[in-house]
Structure formats: C-alpha cells, structure tokens
Image (tube, rainbow, N blue to C red):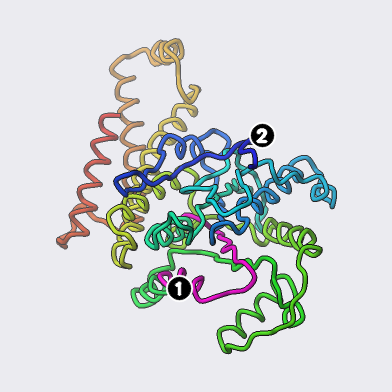
Amino acid sequence: MGKSGHKDGHALCILKKLDNGNWDLNDKRIRKLFTSEEVKDKKIMVLSIAGRSRTGKSYLLNFFLQYLNASEEDRQNDKWLKQTDPSLGFSWRGGTERETSGIWMWSKPFFLKNKHDETLALFLMDTEGFFDARSTSEDCAIIFALSNLLSSVQLFNIKDQLQLDVLKQVEVFSQYGLYAEKSKESKPYQKLIYLIRDWLFVGENCYGFDGGNVYYKNLMNSEKTSNEIREPEKDFLPQVQSLVEQLFSKGWVTAKKLDREEITSEDMVTLFRNYVLLFNENDIPPPEALFKTIGNVKVENLVRNCKDLYAEEISKELELRGLKKDPCLDELHRLHVNTGDEQELGKMFRKLHEIAMERALEKFRLVTRYSPNSSERGKEYEYYDMLYKRLQLYIELA
C-alpha cells in the first residue's frame, strides 16, 4: 500500500459518508486549506480525478505531485519522471478492494501562472472509485457530481475505452447544461477531460488530446470498434509526461468560476459548505435547486466581501492619517494629543466609519441591483433586503 504523506504535504480526507447516509464535510480542514495566509485572496484552481474503482486514479495523481514538486525545485526536465516514486503521495494499492473513500485533497497548494501571468493556487483532489461492491449508484453519482462542481478541471479516468456506463455517469450534467441554456445561466461545471488509460486501439487513434478528440467524435457517430490491440505499458510514462506538461501549462491553468466569475480561496469554503448541504437534501439535486444554491453562494460571498471592504476602507483612511492598519493604544493616544479635542477625534472616527460603510453598502447594491427604496416587492427583494439590513447591523456594531 502506498504512503499517504511525505515532506511535501499529505492527503486529507475532507468528505466522508456517515452511518446515517449523510455526507460529512470536514469544515476545519477546508478552512485550513483555503484560508491560510499563502492562499488567502488568491484565485483557486482545483484539479480532480474521478472514475471506476481500482483503475489507478491515486497512482496517476502521484505523478502529478512529483511533477509539481519538481517544478518548484526547477527540475523541469525528464529527470522528474525518472525519479518519480508513485508510492509517495495519495494512498493507493493494487487488488480489488477500494483504497480511497469519500473525497480527499492534498494539503499543500502549488502556485502556477495562467496565460495572463496571474498566479493561481492549485489544489489536487482525489475521489472514491465508482462501481465497487460497497458503493451504491447514488454514492457514485454524488461523488462524481460534487467533485465535478467543485473543480475547475476534472479528469474522468477510464480503463481501455469509453463505454456506456461512463456516459450515463455524466448524463446528469447534460440536464444542468440544458437548464442553463434555457434560463440563460452559465453552466455550473467547467472542464471535463476523458482520460483513457491503457488505450488498446492505437492503430485506429493515436495517443494524446488529438487522438482522443477524434475517437470521441467517432464514438458519438458510430458503434464501430477496432480489433487492433497494442500493448500499452511501454508508452505509459511518455504519455504521462505529455499530459502533465499540458495540464499545467499557462494556457490550461484555469481558475474556479461561479456563474462566470473567478472566485478566491475564501469563496471556496462557502461553495463546499453549500454544495454538501444541497446533496444531503437531494441525492441528485434538480437543476432549479442547484442554481438556487449557486445564487445563494454568490450572495454569501458578496456579503463577506462587503464586510472585508469596510475593514479595508477603515484601514486605508487610518493609514492616510499616519496610523498602521491595526493601531495600538500608543498611536491612538498620539492621534488624540495631536487632534487636541476628544470630541473632534470622535467625529473623525464617525466620519471614517460612515464613508467606509457607504462604500461597502454601495458595493452590495451595485452587484445585487437592490434598492432600499424600491416599490418592487417579492421573494428575491425580501431576501436581499434581509441581507442588506444584516450587513448594516454588522457594520454598525463593528
């Protein structure tokens, strides 16, 4: 059995199934992953892998880990592949028994640049295998749906060739896509890549993205298969190298989005919580419920961002007056002495508070198109009105 950790991080279980059938999110671990100082306020890329049990998902992820660690150490050449020890990283083993249960993430983020030369924090996600003796069809669907919705890029790990059971597994997302088109919403998922391992029919389609695209198009239009089979082992490592170099190239580094907007690390915490809650209420949520949850997450993140904006505006105004971001008592005393009037000092702080509060509330109004004086009344207005008043109260008590 492979080792689950080493000096460059370790695997963390973030989601598991309880005896009562509910899915339990480890909130403490999620917060630690996404709110640490090194990733706070950064945009996030989550790359996950899903697929049948016992098909080498964790094994493959460990090659990704080795490549990313080598990149950090400026070993971006063929040597990283020759030095790879796939027993280090996510736990795996041969045989028929499941090794990974629930959803796991690597504790260490990696920092990659996208095509705009912006640095993103990359997290790797491993998932429980499908269709083993201990999994129900509902479990498989939930694990796949959750991991896909939480990822910016997901690999669907497939053995030998693309078959009907795989297409059935992703069928639910076609329903979400159709609903999104009809309601003019953005699709809730981003990029899904079918990764076919031990590809047998090399004479018909070559390895890599080009061969895969041709194969997929042909499969959708024909039932024809080839009988030409080739031994895959000797080609495995070069194709792994080609895959990782493409996945982590600038053009492929993709931030997690929510309704077309790239989100930050703290937004991910809200997203995890709300999605797990949704799937505990519905095995496979209908499109209406999913898009309502996405809307709620956006508003929750907006409220938090408005609170952060208030704090930033206060800090900015204090710094303009020669104070640090978090002034100590000595500095406040100095300001008081320089002002020479306690009443005047109180007025100044009140003014700062009012300016910062108005900027935070204005941001809420602009994004939600909410107006406190609107004559329109409905469920959406009442929801925004409630949040607006809560935000006001929070700032007043700050």
Q: Where is residue 258 in the image (x, y as percent from the top left)?
A: 44, 58
- Checking the image for residue 168, the label placed there is 1
Q: What element carries label 1?
A: helix
Marks 1 and 2, how far apart at CA: 37 Å
Mark yes or no: residue 307 visible.
Answer: yes
- Above or below residue 165? Residue 121 is above
- Checking the image for residue 137, the label placed there is none
- Above or below residue 253? Residue 176 is below
Residue at x 61% of width, y 51% of height: 58
| Quadrant in which residue 375 is drawn | bottom left
170 is within the stretch colored magenta: yes
| Quadrant in which residue 295 is drawn | bottom left
Nearest the viewer among 35 and 116 is 35
Tell me: 191 left or right of 284.
Answer: right
Q: Is mark 2 on a helix, strand or loop?
A: strand
Nearest the viewer among 252 and 8 is 8
Tell me: 49 left or right of 300.
Answer: right
The numbered mark, 1 or 2, whose residue comes first in the sequence reads 2
- Checking the image for residue 6, the label placed there is 2
What amino acid type is highlighted by mark number 2? His
Residue at x 71% of width, y 78% of height: 201
Q: Position of residue 302 (x, y in %)?
A: 37, 48
What amino acid type is highlighted by mark number 1? Lys
Residue at x 50% of width, y 76% of height: 164
* Mark 2 residue crowding within 10 angstroms, few (<14) / some (14–19) / many (20+): few
Q: Position of residue 24 (x, y in %)?
A: 37, 43
Nearest the viewer among 155 and 369 is 155
- The region drawn magenta spans 150-173
Tell me: 185 left or right of 78.
Answer: left
